[in-house]
Image (cartoon, rainbow, N blue to C red):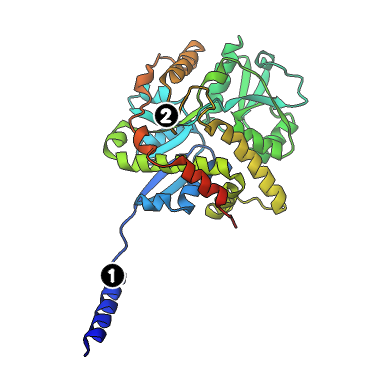
Amino acid sequence: MSRRRFAILSLLILGAAAAALPAKAQTPVRVGWCTKAVTSATSPWAIAMKLGWIEKAGLTLSVTPTAGSADCMKLVATRDYLLALSGIEALATMREQGVKVKIIYTAYRNYVFGIRVPADSPIKTVADLKGKTVGVNSMASNGVLVTRAMAADAGLDPRRDINIVVIGEGAQAAAQLKNKQADAYSAFDTAYALVENAGVPLRDLPNPNATKFPSSGMYALEESIANKRQELVSLGQAFAKGQIFALANPEAAVRILWEVFPQTRPTGTDEATALDNEIKVLNARAQSWRLDADQAGITRWGESVGTKYQAYYDWLVEQKVINRKLDAKDIFTNELIDDINKFDPAEVAAMAKAYKAK
């Protein structure tokens, strides 16, 4: 056999052997998405999966819808989820129960929660809700705590003066509001957009105190922050890149969401209408993604501002929604933020603008 033929045969044998070797094992991780409705607000995760950022980090990601923030925190506490992204009202209760959970990444910089009413409702203020019914997505949702805090702030007795009921999300919530099964709806920005897409315009009941607070963060057990640091950094960076991508190209973000999570693609409507509606949902959430959303001078994706968290928990204590005063340093950390931000945001934005979705 000639040297050339021997070399070619050797390369073929080595190639076949390499192909037969098992692929490098990926570490499976579950993250909680703390509402049953998976919308374009979830697009940063979908983008990270589609563009291979999760796989490159050696991870396989499962994004798991859950009834509400309280349930999400319990599943982080039991280690079913490595981390979750939701409102952080229930964190105080978990800390009281000895569960050491900390926010590692502030995802939504301004307040996405509140109480809204149908646009033609005679209700003008939170105080006008006395004797009325407020709908929430579930009794595990942060809408329950937010409603009670806002009611107390308006001088109502949140246990006696208002009735809180479950009305679901999207078209179901819209129907309940339209049929007067609830007078108001306590949820969050994208949930309101879904109700409006279903034909029920909404109007906000203003609460000046709440507008200065952050809304949602990614949180994990302190033991995970210590022992699974690289996984958390990789997930935080992937989400940050996904936020930047979605801000730069909302249409591509929605189309990627539909590709990665096919169940999110609406049926029974034409594609142009479905796309327009979903971009409205994305834009409702994207306002709180921007680094300048809270006017705090933040320059790093995911960075938390302790004074803002402290003000929020002090307000919840003042309204007697939570029982024990918290020190902000016990509920958040920025120790992963430098590593999370080791990428070029301009490069991600340019990639997004050039991306042609199917």
Which numbered marker is on residue 60?
A: none
Q: Which residue is mark 2?
A: 303
Q: Position of residue 345 (x, y in %)?
A: 46, 40
Res 170 → quadrant: top right
Can you give x and y, in whole percent of width and height, for residue 174 in the image? 70, 35
Q: Secondary structure at mark 1?
A: helix
Left or right side of 264 for 27? left
Mark closest to the chain's N terminus, 1 or 2:
1
- Amino acid on which the number 2 mark rests in the picture: Glu
In the foreground, 332 or 2:
2
Residue 300 screen position, x and y as percent: 43, 31
Judge by depth and name the residue closer to the eye, 8 or 207: 8
Report crowding for label 1: few under 14, some 14 to 19, many 20 or more residues within 10 A (C-alpha).
few
As drawn, is 142 to the left or to the right of 52?
Answer: right
Q: Is residue 50 left or right of residue 221?
A: right
Q: Which residue is found at the position 51% from the left and 40% from the top?
A: 243
Q: Looking at the picture, how far across and down is residue 40, in whole percent?
A: 58, 43
Give the vertical position of 309 relative to 136 (above or below). Answer: above
Residue at the spot of label 1 = 18
Question: Which SS class for mark 2?
Answer: loop
Q: Residue at x 58, y 21 (%)?
A: 147
User: Is residue 37 in view from this perspective?
Assistant: no
Q: Indicate the quadrant containing the N terminus: top left, top right, bottom left or bottom right.
A: bottom left
Amino acid type, mark 1: Ala
Which residue is pictured at 30% across the width and 59% down the height?
24
